[in-house]
Amino acid sequence: PEYDPTTLFVPEDYLRNCTPGMRKWWELKSQYFDCVIFYKVGKFYELYHMDAVVGVNKLGLVFMKGTWAHSGFPEIAFDRFSNILVQKGHKVVRVEQMETPEMMEARCRAMSHPTKYDRVVHREVCRIISKGTQTYSILDGDFSETHNKYLLCLKEKCDDSTGLHRIYGVCFVDTTVGKFYLGQFLDDRHSSRFRTLLAHYPPVQILFERGNPTTETQKILKNLLPSAVQEGLIAGSQFWNASKTLKALIEEGYFKDKENANSGVVLPPVIESMTAESDSLGLTPGENSELALSALGCCIFYLKKCIIDREILSMAKFEEFVPVDTDIGKGIKSSSIFANTNQRMVLDGVTLANLEIFENA
């Protein structure tokens, strides 16, 4: 039941019969079974076995001669081909050569008894690109893209046994600008606020804890966002709890540039407001914040897996998400008579979709 479908078991007997280079590929594939691996060989990116079939069917590549499925393309075409696969819902792993053949030979000469597995150019995973983690760098994405593409992490809890009220903890980020939205809110049995959130900030990728979202919430996600990539993560190891999230934020030193000599590491104000006032170290989640911090933990885990966690989190751009009707109800920041008397109209998710406010059907 705790099997991770993103991994693959490859028998050791099979690996022994592989060439050193292909053994390395299978070791990577066993860890990233749900991804298409772009494997750098010289000036080309190579695709093998099932990945080669994807390349031929979806990228228009051609099979090369050999005993197994094999295709590839020049390195200059990486951004175009990776973007095509990502937009089709695939995840792409970029594996780069970390040394030249000359460096590999020098390394082997320095070893007393180098094996055949040592005589392979060292390669490492440099990036994992998914629909919700594109940063639109020189190797990643289409610069003509104009819409926000949010990665949404959510956790749900029923407030009572009747299921009439539910609580959502959400964290969503636009990795192109590194801005996080973090919040926790009470919702009705129709999930009105959650539906409105999905309409205002339509995500392209959704992460949730396995077995956590209720059947009703899963139906909402399926009906409102049929094209969004959805992935369930394992509780604890992948979808962190609130305490583990706060501990990771401080230990990893994402906000070191914001350090204060007197108080140590300073968390961004939004996150700090979600910690317990009694804990000066900021390691204890505050009341009514555990779901939001847990959703943030899921987001951190995933960005870390994609190797962009430090790049995105170090910007420290966090904003609290408050449902629009709650914001209007407070009416604090506006002197408008409409804000003070709660006379502004809120367009909920259903209305926004039916009137085609944000996008045409």
Image (tube, rainbow, N blue to C red):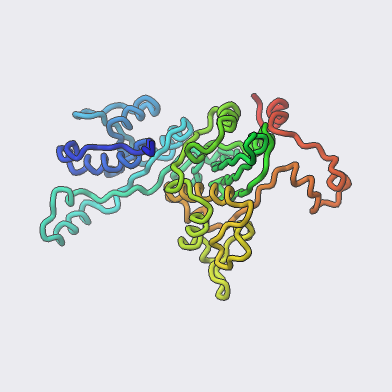
Q: Would residue 258 be seen by someone viewing this image from the given angle?
A: no
At a point 63% along the width and 51% down the height, the residue shown is 288
Query: Which residue is at the front of the view, 319 or 326?
Result: 326
Query: Which residue is at the front of the view, 339 or 100?
Result: 339
The location of residue 313, given as percent across then percent down, is 52, 55
- The furthest residue to the left: 113
In the image: residue 173, left or right of residue 191: left
Query: Which residue is at the front of the view, 281 or 88?
Result: 281
In the image: residue 346, left or right of residue 221: right
323 versus 243 height, above or below: above
User: In the figure, residue 277 lies in which quadrant?
Assistant: bottom right
The location of residue 268, given as percent across then percent down, is 60, 60
Q: Would residue 104 be seen by someone viewing this image from the given angle?
A: yes
Quadrant that contains the N terminus: top left
127 versus 257 height, above or below: above
User: In the figure, residue 315 lies in which quadrant?
Assistant: bottom right
Number of on-image labels: 0
In the image: residue 276, left or right of residue 332: left
The location of residue 130, given as percent across then percent down, is 46, 39
At a point 82% along the width and 40% down the height, the residue shown is 344
- The furthest residue to the front: 161
The location of residue 84, given as percent across then percent down, is 45, 32
Quadrant that contains the C terminus: top right
